[in-house]
């Protein structure tokens, strides 16, 4: 695989991670999508924290995932609810997991990204936020259910 292709893949992965953070921040702070996206693009992409440089994200992919997660939140949340156990509606789910499901659901339904890629990528995002492998397994199960609903032809 060429270096440019690996770099593009890494930037896409970073943009997914940033999108989940941005969605979480919007929910917890009440900021608008424009405010949060501006902050991330101006201050987070490529920022240096304690000597560690954050990777640059794919700006276009970040914008698309965040905007689609906001614009299609109701249908994505409904699809997520159908994938969750009845006693665990999306409103009772950890806000970080909710952001993961919204970003992944938006990408699943509004882009051509193959569902299996979306599942693996957002499982990796969940692993970055949660040390217990139960969360990544939970994300895998929910996203698999969502993918089979969103793009049954891919299975």
Image (spheres, rainbow, N blue to C red):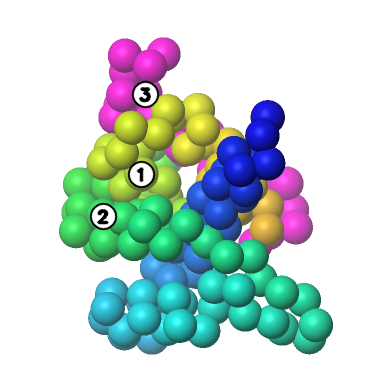
Q: Is residue 39 above or below residue 138?
A: below
SS of the residue under disc 2: helix
Which quadrant of the figure contains the C terminus?
top left
SS at mark 1 in the image: helix
| Circle 3 residues within 10 Å: few <14, some 14–19, many ≥20 | some
In the drawing, does residue 30 fall left or right of residue 24?
Answer: left
- Residue 93 lies, in percent from the top left, at 45, 59
Instruction: Please identify, in this view, whether the residue under mark 3 or under mark 1 is nearer the observer.
Output: 1
The magenta span reads 129-155
**SS type, badge 3:** helix
Which residue carries the number 1 mark?
A: 107
Would residue 146 be seen by someone viewing this image from the given angle? Answer: no
Which residue bears the numbered disc 3?
Answer: 148
Crowding at mark 2 (Cα within 10 Å: few <14, some 14-19, many 20+): many
Residue at image location 27% in from the left, 47% down from the top: 76
Could you tell me what secondary structure mostly forms the magenta stretch? helix
Q: Quadrant of residue 54?
A: bottom right
Q: Earlier in the sequence, mark 3 or mark 2?
A: 2
Residue 59, image x, y percentages:
42, 62
Q: Is residue 51 left or right of residue 101?
A: right
Residue 155 marker: none
Task: Give yes or no for contact between labels 2 and 1 (Cβ–Cβ under 8 Å).
Answer: yes
Instruction: Report how many numbered discs are placed on residues in the image.
Output: 3
| Residue 56 against residue 78 in the figure, above or below | below
Report the quarter where the N terminus lies.
Answer: top right
| Above-or-below relation of 154 to 61 | above
Separation (CA) of disc 2 from disc 1: 8 Å
Asked whether 62 falls inside the magenta stretch, the response is no
Residue to which mark 2 is pinned = 68
């Amino acid at each position: 695989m060429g270096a440019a292709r690996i770099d593009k893949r890494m930037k896409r992965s970073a943009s997914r991670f940033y999108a989940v953070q941005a969605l979480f921040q919007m929910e917890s702070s009440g900021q608008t999508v424009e405010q949060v996206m501006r902050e991330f693009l101006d201050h987070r992409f490529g920022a240096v924290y304690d000597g560690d440089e954050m990777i640059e994200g794919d700006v276009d992919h970040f914008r698309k995932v965040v905007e689609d997660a906001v614009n299609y939140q109701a249908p994505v949340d409904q699809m997520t609810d159908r994938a969750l156990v009845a006693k665990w509606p999306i409103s009772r789910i950890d806000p970080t997991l909710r952001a993961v499901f919204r970003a992944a659901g938006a990408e699943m339904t509004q882009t051509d990204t193959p569902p299996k890629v979306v599942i693996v990528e957002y499982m990796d995002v969940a692993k970055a936020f949660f040390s217990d492998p139960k969360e990544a397994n939970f994300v895998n199960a929910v996203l698999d259910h969502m993918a089979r609903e969103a793009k049954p032809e891919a299975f």
